[in-house]
Amino acid sequence: MPEHTHPDQVSAQAAFAALADPVRMLIVRELALAPEWERACGTFEVPVGKAALSHHFAVLRSAGLIEQRDVGARRVNRLRRPEFDARFPGLLDLALRG
Amino acid sequence: MPEHTHPDQVSAQAAFAALADPVRMLIVRELALAPEWERACGTFEVPVGKAALSHHFAVLRSAGLIEQRDVGARRVNRLRRPEFDARFPGLLDLALRG
């Protein structure tokens, strides 16, 4: 399992930096629309290569924005919406509103 | 006078990017504590050179976070708190809380 950071351990600066990137916001947006644990990492249509995408997922985990788990060969994702909202009230809404 | 951007013209991503930098947050924090139009650009104790500082002020202007005007040889600043709060409710509070 990849390493995770709970939103309670995340600084506002790290949260802003995570949300300031268009590729990461694309992932966050799609996760906000999907049921939890449904989207696998390979299913996002993003204009970056595999290594860059893997880095973006790591940034999202370390900002407390997503949780990942491995199910067979797939790594599936959920947006940590309630936990993140509790730590940074209104921030995800602002980000999703754009 | 330097070029300004009103917060209404700023994307959430640009606002997050502006607030994600520690030097810019240092400036924003000090402006939040000072009366408007009091602090001149040269009065901030920041660990960067003049060119970098000038860039940070430009980013803060273009994110709708500060307004600047020239008074004689001094360029003085105000935090655009009410306008920025209206565009991004709660965001500056989150940033200042850290």
Image (cartoon, coloured by chain):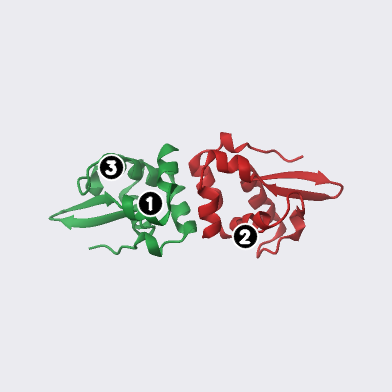
Chain colours: A green, B red
Q: Are marks 3 and 1 in contact (CB under 8 Å)?
A: no
For the residue labelled by badge 3, is the local secondary structure a helix, a strand or a loop?
loop
Residue drawn at 53 percent across, 59 percent down = B97
Indicate which label's residue lies in the foreground, 3 or 1.
1
Residue A45 location, x and y as percent? 30, 39
Q: Amino acid at mark 3?
A: Phe
Which residue is label 3 attached to?
A: A44
Q: CA distance from mark 2 to mark 3?
A: 36 Å
Indicate which label's residue lies in the foreground, 1 or 2.
1
In this rendering, position of residue B92 left or right of residue B43:
left
Chain assignment, label 3:
A
Query: For mark 2, does the 10 Å Cα neighbourhood hold few (<14), some (14 to 19), or many (20 or more) residues?
Result: some
Q: Give the camera-side residue of B13 and B92.
A: B92
Which residue is label 2 attached to?
A: B26
Which residue is label 1 attached to?
A: A85
Q: Are marks 2 and 3 in contact (CB under 8 Å)?
A: no
Specify whether residue B60 is in view.
yes
Eyeballing the image, is B83 above or below B53?
above
For the residue labelled by badge 2, is the local secondary structure a helix, a strand or a loop?
helix
Residue drawn at 55 percent across, 50 percent down = B92
Eyeballing the image, is B80 above or below A62?
above
Q: CA distance from mark 3 to mark 1?
A: 23 Å
Q: How many marks?
A: 3
